[in-house]
Amino acid sequence: MAERVHTGDSQPATKENSTPKPLPPSPEKPIPQPGTYVIQIPKDRIYRVPPPENASRYAHLSKRKAPRSTCRRCCCCLLTSILVILLAASIAAALVYFVFKPESPNYSVESVAIKGFNLTSSSPLSPEFDVTVRAHNPNDKIGIYYEKGSSVKVYYEDVNLCNGALPAFYQPTNNITVLNTALKASSIELTNSALRALSDEQNKGTVPFTLKLRAPVKIKVGSIKTWKITVKVTCKITVDKLTAASKIVSKDCDYGVDLW
C-alpha cells in the first residue's frame, strides 16, 4: 500500500481562500439609501385610463365636476362685466366733472309774509305763508329743469302748518331765479301749550319755523338731460312776528339731492 506524501510547504485551504470576494457596485446604478425602496412596475401595468373596475366611478366624478366649473365661469364673467361697467362709469363721471365742472345750486328763503294766526281764539287756524325762495344756478354749462310734483311745507315743531308747490320752469346757466310761493292750509288745531308758546315767542320777536322743499329736477348737460333727481332743501327760519309785515330774523338752509 502506498503512503500519502505531504509536502512541507503545502497548507490546508482556508475559508478566506474558498469564499469569493463580492464585486464592487456598478457606478451606473446607485445603491438606494437605507429605508428607501424602489418599485419597478412593468409598462403594461401602467394605466393612462382608469382600469375597468374604476371606470364607472371615474365617469360619475367627472359628471359632478362639470356643473361646478360652468357655474364658476359664469360667476367670473359676471364679475368681470360688473367691473368693466363700473370702470366705464367712473371714467365717464370723471370726464363730465373735468369738462363741465359742475357746482351745486344754492337756495335760500328771502322773505315770509304770514296770515291767519289768531292766537287769542280757540277755533282752528287757517295759516297762510307767502314765501319767496331764491334759487341760484352757478354753472356755466349746466341747466336745470324743475319738473312738476314739487312740495313746499312749513312746520312749527312737528306740526305741518301749510303746504304749497313750486312752478315748473327751466333755469339756464349762471342764473338766479326768485320764486314766490303761496302756502295755505285750513282747520289746523294746535294744543293750548303750542298756542301759548307761539304767543310768548312773538312777544320776544323770535318765532321759529322749518321750511322743507322737495323738487324733482332734470340736469341738462349740453344736449343731454338726465333722469329725475330730487332736490331737498331744509331751512330753519325765525321771524319777528306772525303778520304780513313779518321779517326774517335768522335763517339757515341745508340742501342735498336724492339721485334715485
Image (cartoon, rainbow, N blue to C red):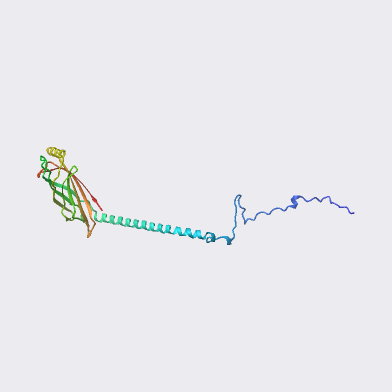
Left or right of residue 99, residue 251 in this image: left
In the image, what residue occupies the spot 75% across and 52% down?
18
Q: Where is residue 108 in the image (x, y as percent from the top left)?
A: 17, 47
Left or right of residue 179, residue 72 in this image: right
In the image, what residue occupies the spot 54% across and 59% down?
53
Q: Nearer the viewer, residue 62 or 186?
A: 186
Q: Position of residue 81 (x, y in %)?
A: 35, 58
Q: Number of marks in the image?
A: 0
Whether residue 15 appears in this view of the structure is yes
Q: Nearer the viewer, residue 171 or 239?
A: 239
Residue 159 lies in quadrant: top left
Residue with the most extreme right position: 1
Residue 245 lies in quadrant: top left
In the image, what residue occupies the spot 36% across and 57% down?
78
Which part of the image, by quadrant, shows the N terminus? bottom right
Left or right of residue 42, residue 65 in this image: left
Q: Position of residue 61 (x, y in %)?
A: 48, 58
Q: Where is residue 208 in the image (x, y as percent from the top left)?
A: 16, 41
Whether residue 51 appears in this view of the structure is no
